Image (cartoon, rainbow, N blue to C red):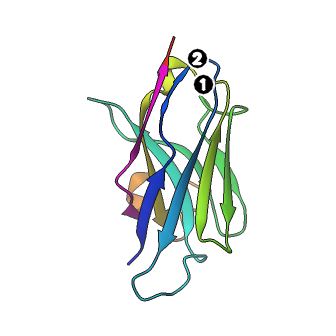
């Protein structure tokens, strides 16, 4: 079991930046470093879509819509994963979810991820 808690969502203007954080923990107290970590987002009436994923060996994949603007990073010492978002656009407005999975191959497919956070909302106004 892995518990994920996101934070950092906010309302910003077009062109602004945000940094989302996800704290990962295990009730057993074990390490979460063996999990691939990802960020997804979902808007009202839309399917959840992958934004970025980082595997345990550091391989990353980004959605085409965020390449060059978003960066995923991990702090293994603090069991955290981050999503740094720059040059934000109104179409980035969504609820952002942190997810953990095993052997995802850096594919951002929801069924590869077993554990999900509650989400943090991001609103980008024009």
Which residue is label 2 attached to?
14
Which one is in front, 8 or 1? Answer: 8
- Per the rendering, the mark at residue 19 is none
Position of the N terminus by quadrant: bottom left
Judged left or right of residue 119, residue 105 is right
Which residue is label 1 attached to?
88
Q: Is residue 98 magenta?
A: no
Answer whether labels 1 and 2 touch (C-beta < 8 Å).
Answer: yes
Which one is in front, 98 or 77? Answer: 77
> Label 2: how many residues lie within 10 Å, few (<14), some (14-19) or many (20+)?
some
Which one is in front, 95 or 51? Answer: 95
Q: Residue furthest left?
A: 45
> Label 1: how many residues lie within 10 Å, few (<14), some (14-19) or many (20+)?
many
Residue at the image position 67 percent from the left and 61 percent from the top = 74
Residue 61: x percent and y percent? 65, 48
Residue 116: x percent and y percent? 38, 60
Residue at the image position 64 percent from the left and 63 percent from the top = 55
Which picture quadrant has residue 78? Answer: bottom right
Compared to residue 50, the image places residue 64 above or below, namely above
């Amino acid at each position: 079991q892995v518990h994920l808690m996101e934070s950092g969502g906010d309302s910003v203007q077009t062109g602004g930046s945000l940094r989302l954080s996800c704290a990962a923990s295990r009730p057993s107290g074990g390490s979460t470093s063996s999990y691939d970590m990802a960020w997804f987002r979902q808007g009202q009436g839309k399917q959840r879509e992958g934004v970025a994923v980082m595997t345990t060996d550091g391989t990353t994949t980004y959605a085409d819509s965020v390449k060059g603007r978003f960066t995923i990073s991990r702090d293994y010492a603090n069991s955290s994963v981050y999503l740094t978002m720059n040059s934000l656009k109104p179409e980035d407005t969504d609820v952002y979810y942190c997810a953990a999975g095993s052997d995802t191959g850096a594919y951002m497919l929801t069924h590869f991820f077993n554990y999900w956070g509650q989400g943090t909302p991001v609103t980008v106004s024009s």
